[in-house]
Amino acid sequence: MTYKLKQLAEQLNVKLHGDGNVVINSVASIDKATEGDISFISSARYVDSLRSTSASAVIIREDMLENTHVAALLVENPRATYARVVDLLYPQQQPEKGVHSTACIDKSAKISTSACIGANVVIEAGAEISDDAIIEAGCVIGKNSQIGKSTHLYPNVTVYYGCRIGEHCILHSSSVVGSDGFGFEFDKTEWLKIPQVGGVRIGNKVEIGACSVVDRGALNDTVIEEGVKLDNHVQIAHNVHVGAHTVMSRGVGVAGSTIIGKNCLIAGMVGIRDNIEIADNVTITAMTMVTSSIREAGSYSSPTPMDDTRSWRKNSVRFRQLDNMAKRIRELEKLIKNKG
Amino acid sequence: MTYKLKQLAEQLNVKLHGDGNVVINSVASIDKATEGDISFISSARYVDSLRSTSASAVIIREDMLENTHVAALLVENPRATYARVVDLLYPQQQPEKGVHSTACIDKSAKISTSACIGANVVIEAGAEISDDAIIEAGCVIGKNSQIGKSTHLYPNVTVYYGCRIGEHCILHSSSVVGSDGFGFEFDKTEWLKIPQVGGVRIGNKVEIGACSVVDRGALNDTVIEEGVKLDNHVQIAHNVHVGAHTVMSRGVGVAGSTIIGKNCLIAGMVGIRDNIEIADNVTITAMTMVTSSIREAGSYSSPTPMDDTRSWRKNSVRFRQLDNMAKRIRELEKLIKNKG
Amino acid sequence: MTYKLKQLAEQLNVKLHGDGNVVINSVASIDKATEGDISFISSARYVDSLRSTSASAVIIREDMLENTHVAALLVENPRATYARVVDLLYPQQQPEKGVHSTACIDKSAKISTSACIGANVVIEAGAEISDDAIIEAGCVIGKNSQIGKSTHLYPNVTVYYGCRIGEHCILHSSSVVGSDGFGFEFDKTEWLKIPQVGGVRIGNKVEIGACSVVDRGALNDTVIEEGVKLDNHVQIAHNVHVGAHTVMSRGVGVAGSTIIGKNCLIAGMVGIRDNIEIADNVTITAMTMVTSSIREAGSYSSPTPMDDTRSWRKNSVRFRQLDNMAKRIRELEKLIKNKG
């Protein structure tokens, strides 16, 4: 799409600086932008790039104004405005409304006339698909499950029976909602399956990445509150509760019945054990192992740092001697003191 | 479903205590249970909750009897009996037997008349689906693969050609059985693929989680023995052999040709290298890296513990100095001794 | 298939030693091989097995010749020749060319007449499937995406819109190409999605494992160069660039905008942070956390070694005291020196 800068300013209701008639048809990073591009900087660190940019316009905070020679949108959060500009310049093509002729819809399912149901989709008895929802090719929606308004399932997503997914959610391909929690009891000679009869409840504006899994509850529901964003390969086990607006990067695993607060930032490949609680506003850095509750907001970490393999080998064998080393230091301290 | 307690006792062949006519129609945890609920405690830790529960009945060990005022089922393993009670109270609705009109079945495939084949399922030449098996929507079963009696594949599972899956297994959505093992040889300028011509053999009562993958063997079969339970995102590489009743939690990766014993408990996100052996009855705690064989039963671990990020930073940089620290302690010990 | 050894030598253009008329119909490992088998050894370590093998023929380096009593193919890289022999002895059955009657193909899609399109495949508007490509059952190819010559998609793969996949690639089941990168900006009270409008570009001879994910770029493309091999459960985030012939084992995660060199070997469950650069010819050992750029070829590592859990507990708590320990050693050194 093509906009004049003043049109963008109007639509987004933000302050315009300079020539509102410059034509914008694409976005680019501040260093690579050329005529027709709009760009942004989110921090004063990029002020040199701002000064020398070839973009037709930029999105900046007002206090950066002296550093630009091109037209600008002046905003508090340039990256957020950038996201909205991208939405305008690159509108997503919506698939056609209606039910594809190859979809298998149980006659007791309720499908909104404004929903879009793709090829080979299967929707089982009692399921409900709300207004403007998009269910792409190959998705399967189990019995009595509900998909909220404007929620978008990309191809080959599976939602088991009895799950409720809110409005404006996005589920990426190969993700799974409602699979059995991992519950077994050893009974004499073998593992007995503990039936998983809870469901899954997902709030509005939740995004679930490709190949991510949200298991159903054992007895009560697994719950993901509104605004939660899960990257790819994330696992939410049975009866976990994830607080609103918490973000989990790729590969995070949360074990059963753990309760995670609101507005947490959990980096990639973090493992969180079962039956603990994480407070609101907790940050956990990448690849950390969380084995006990975190009661206070703050940042938490655990892994060891990278080194060249030769040095690492020498140091890492010493890890097994740490307790011994600590005791020997103590001993030395005593000896020295006694000789004092 | 609704049962009188005495009916549950009869069906499960366990000892009844108190009023057998109390009506049970659901399960709940000991603290939340109300009238109509049956609950259980698995350990004396919960004895206070047992004393104050509002459940209509409880499942307990006989030695807990003095602590309950409500009717009870008296058993050795309360959690196992609980699992069986859940099965009775919440019977899984079985999909209708027969082949859905949209399924594509090769005419050389053998499908039991008691099997259930869902919408858009694809079953290739020579495949066999046994009695009472359930193959849900969107699954693909490759050439000459066999699915055992009463095995249940949830939607969108893929089984490649030439794989044998036993009886009473459960495979969750987006899981994959029989994909190529990861075998390449660098040949002058590029990687040459080593064809993976083995298969996969999976015993009875195996459960495989959502988005888990079992690769086919390079030459011989990859083997998973009976009763093994794999959580979500688990990877079993080519020619791995997993012993009976071993359990792997979410995200475990086992590399090629490794042999894992029976009755092992492998916690979440453990990585196990290729071409090693793990004995029977081994426990490996979460996020451990296993780089050599484990010859004896026992519990094994490796990662570092979580701390607040500021403290962690200070300590973690010291990890690279461990060998140096160890040598300096040795040096100090010598100096002190010499001065002795 | 059955070959005389001299036929194999001719077809592969390698040197024959001994009886070219021995009949070969299968491969087996050097210890297990019997009549009709061909085997190989890749290292002098297996010379005893070579001497005692019951194989009908072996593939060896010429300098091993004195240790064999059976017919042989003499080559520089026995494993590479073995891979080619497997290809000859176990030819993959190709599915029938043409479009399955249940496939949904948009009329604006271009499908080569030599391509094979399986049951229930969905190919959207403007997509192109090149000569000899194989798209197995249940795959979905989004709008305007391109699948190169002889590329093979196993069942239930999803390729989003606007992605280009090269020639002779292999994509395994449940893998996903082109899902949204994980980009959000916190805007007052909630996360705002940053639209991901770049694509994915994958070179020739790339293999992508089961349940692996390659996200589309935020603005520019995510790029995987030719000959890259990705195992199962690998994640390539938005705008990552992976250099030619780099190999990533199972579970590796590469975060956004990171640039990885050519011919790297990245072992299982390695995590690589965003916005860094890894040089060519870098090896990273299993479960390493990479938090900064690697400028020089070499081998890099980070995790701690396994121990029995009891010892590990004692040592691992000391990890939190490392900085304190280091300072106390320094202090002791000073005290000793002063007493010198």
Image (cartoon, coloured by chain):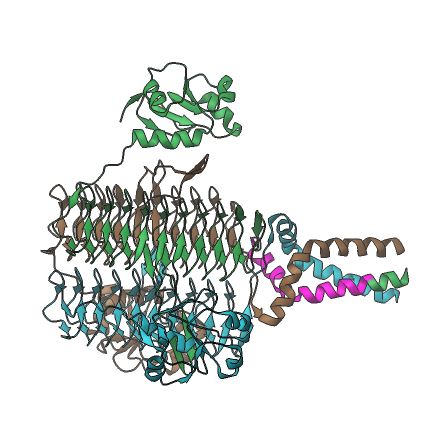
Chain colours: A green, B cyan, C brown
Indicate left or right for A310 with C156 as reference. Answer: right
Residue A198 screen position, x and y as percent: 36, 62
Quadrant in the picture for residue A294: bottom right
- Magenta-colored span: A305-333
Foreground pick, A171 / C88: A171
> Dividing the image into 4 quarters, which one contains the C terminus of chain A?
bottom right
Quadrant in the picture for residue A58: top left
Indicate left or right for B44 with B55 as reference. Answer: right
Q: Is residue A324 magenta?
A: yes
Residue B226 screen position, x and y as percent: 35, 78
Q: How many marks?
A: 0
Residue C66 screen position, x and y as percent: 39, 77
B266 relative to C276, above or below: below
Foreground pick, B50 / A152: B50
> Dividing the image into 4 quarters, which one contains the N terminus of chain A?
top left
Residue C122 screen position, x and y as percent: 17, 50
Foreground pick, B21 / A338: B21
